[in-house]
Image (tube, grey):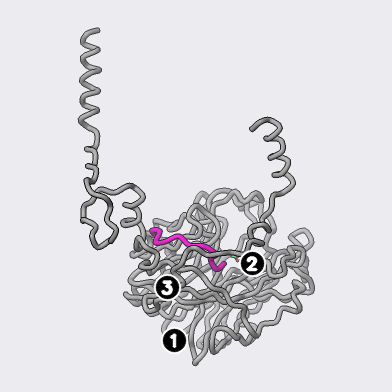
Amino acid sequence: MKQGILFAILLSVLACTKQEPKEELPTTAFPLKLENLEENRPMSAAMKRAFNNYEAPRLLDNELYSNFRYTQLEGLDYHGGDGTISRRDPSKIIFENGKYYVWYTYRNTPVAPRGFEKANDTIPSTDWDLAEIWYATSEDGFTWEEQGVAVPRPKKPMRGHRSVATADILKWKDSYYLYYQAFDAPSGKYNPEKDAYDICPVAMSKASSPDGPWEPIDKVVVPFGESDAWDWRVIHDPNPLVHDGKVYLYYKSGLDVRDANRKFWDVWGLVVADNPEGPFVKHPLSPVTNSGHETMIFPFREGVAALIGTDGIEHYTIQYAKDWVNFEIASVSQLFPTAAGVYCPDSFTDSKNADGITWGLSHFINAGNDWGNMYSILGRFDCDLSLSVDDPSLKQSNLLYPNDLYFSRGLSEDQKTRIKERIKNNK
Ligand code: AAL
């Protein structure tokens, strides 16, 4: 018994001596001016994070922080907003032949999307069903002139005969490549074999000029994962960039069951190839983000930056991966562009000091505020995520939104009932 007690005491003494030494508390107050901060000053967890985890502790000094300004575009017609014409999911923007080019999902159908049950050869299931890839050019980035179709729906049985959507562009040597989602069935159709709704491989087309003609390359460019892998069901939103002489292509897929309750988890992976047509090899650390439905990724300094928009634990963060793989949060922002295409002059230059971005095009999916006749529009966003621009107004974070915006997010009837019930039960 005595021995037992002694052993217990010994164990607890050992446990105490094993404890991490306590960090000493500072004896002076935190300085007013950062220039007076001593190098190894002990700090609270939050202040340590401010210095160690972000691009810079103050937003004004943070090259990877920005708020966003929005401008409506001139020149694109939406048929009075009746839901029959939609433009969404813009590509990166490139500057060629003295003008800007953008590609996007274009839907022109007799009616707005009606859901999978009602879809047929002319009625679209979703906003990106029965779509083609169109393109527009602009001299100033505000007024756009639609040039027409770049990639039409190919004939059956070629991939994408039901719809081609969500394109992105790569310029490689003297050729141009469009990567896009190629649907063979109406989007939203449940596929029991894959237990998923939006199955489509990434296909591609090639041209020697951004004005086409585009020649389809009928193959699955980014391989689906094995049946027990995170990306076996869905490969969406391909985004090709050039790094270290190779094509780095980021794409979205989802963990867990992609069921009607949206219990899945959108994350992004990376594939790398020596040439635009592949073969693309998955980076073994994929997924490389833990969030982001529509993530916008662009070269920055020697690495790559990501605007993680909606969805996920790190939504509305701007992140940076120095090695193009391991993303860290650089800042937290708000009112992000959605599924945007960025104008990044260094997308394909393989620069080791990429300047970043100052603008791009975003889509707005509830353009008519009427889900029964939904369509999407393209709009411009501006920001300061560029080393060569310094715009303090874009580094502010205390943005004022109209009161109506808050009150438009009212309680549902179910929520009101729950609140009443809790009052009744004194909760
Ligand atoms: C988009 C993208 C992909 C999805 C759908 C159309 O915003 O994430 O393209 O499949 O929604």
Cα gap from disc 1 to disc 2, whole angstroms: 29 Å
User: Which residue matches tag 2?
Assistant: 183
Q: Quadrant of residue 36?
A: bottom left
Give me the residue at 63% from left, 74% from top: 105
Q: Amino acid at mark 1?
A: Asp
Q: Where is residue 262 drawn, in percent x and y?
A: 62, 51
> Is any part of residue 157 visible from this angle?
no
Q: Quadrant of residue 371?
A: bottom right
Magenta region, residue range: 328-338
Position of residue 275 relative to residue 55, above or below, is below
Q: Where is residue 296 drawn, in percent x and y?
A: 49, 68
Label 1 CA crowd tier, 10 Å (few <14, some 14–19, many 20+): few
> Is any part of residue 72 visible from this angle?
yes
Q: Is residue 374 left or right of residue 249?
A: right
Numbered disc 3: secondary structure: helix
Point out the image quarter for the N terminus. Answer: top left
Is 335 in the magenta? yes
Is 243 in the magenta? no
